[in-house]
Image (tube, rainbow, N blue to C red):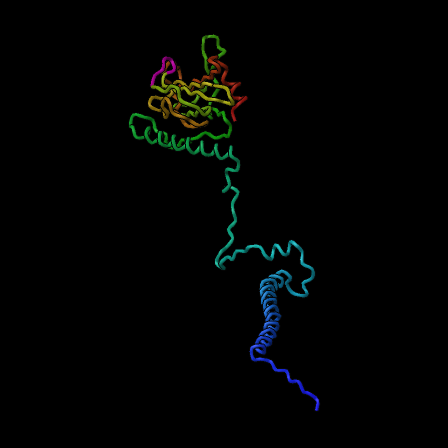
Amino acid sequence: MPETTIETTSPDATRKQEGTRSAALVRPVRTVAILGAVGALVAAIALPAFASASGPADAGPVTTEQLAADNAQSIVVASEATQVASAREQFTATTPDEIEQQKAEEAAAARAAAAAATVSSSASRPSVAGLALVASGAGAVRYPVTSFTAGEGPGSGRGHEGWDMIAPEGTPIYAAAAGTVTASAESIGGYGVSIMIMSNINGTMVETRYGHMVYGSRMVEAGEQVAAGQLIGLVGNTGNSYGSHLHFEVRIGGSVIDPEPWLAANAG
């Protein structure tokens, strides 16, 4: 009778073999699960964006500009909102120079209004009601009187150093240029009631003098800053004067110049 060999395996060896087979099966399953999760995450993020950018299937090729427009920010306006047309007059100052000029004119008007209120509060002082507080014009130099008749100038040969601008008593007088008031009094020699202003015009120091004003009409004091065209007083007949007029002087570097051609060349 042939010999029969029977191999036996212990329980511990059997458990080891089963464990090895289980581990070998778990690793591929785990890898597949991880790859599946990553793929699902990518799809969740990319597909909506792709669908939004791509648009409908029949929309044709999408350009970069269309993508930018589709993803741009938008604003929702309530149905009650209406469009209001803007008038040109609403935009008065557009450059830094225009803005500064506008501010200076507004400040000059405010100062003149305050001075006018002070003048009007005194019964002995002339009224400035109804007068323009700032002269028209846009230049750095303005005419000190806007309506006048030309009188004697500095070339008369009798030591007359200004230009007589003949106008009715009470006619407004404006600062010819922005600057600092160096003198303001009810009597300065032959000038009578007068004001003097020092200005820096394009780097040149220019002094302007305003004589023979009405008593009590001065609206600025020494040390104050004035703007070009600011109301400073009223035409009168004080001091060495023979008739109502403004004696207007211009001095550059301490030397008297003829105000008439100077104004014609510089005033705007």
Residue lying farthest to the right in this orientation: 2
Magenta region includes residue 189: yes
Q: Is residue 45 above or below residue 233?
A: below
- Residue at left offset 62%, top offset 62%: 50
Q: Quadrant of residue 125?
A: top left
Can I make out residue 138 in this image? yes
Residue 169, given in percent of the width and then of the height, sits at 39, 23
Residue 96, given in percent of the width and then of the height, sits at 51, 34
Residue 136, given in percent of the width and then of the height, sits at 48, 30
Query: What is the magenta range?
Result: 186-191
Q: Is residue 142 above or below residue 153?
A: below
Residue 179, given in percent of the width and then of the height, sits at 44, 24
Viewer-side residue, 19 vs 102: 19
Q: Quadrant of residue 238?
A: top left
Residue lying farthest to the bottom in this orientation: 1
Viewer-side residue, 22 vs 4: 4
Can I make out residue 245 in this image? no
Q: Is residue 139 left or right of residue 197?
A: right
- Residue at left offset 51%, top offset 28%: 139
In which quadrant will I find the N terminus? Answer: bottom right
Viewer-side residue, 214 vs 28: 28
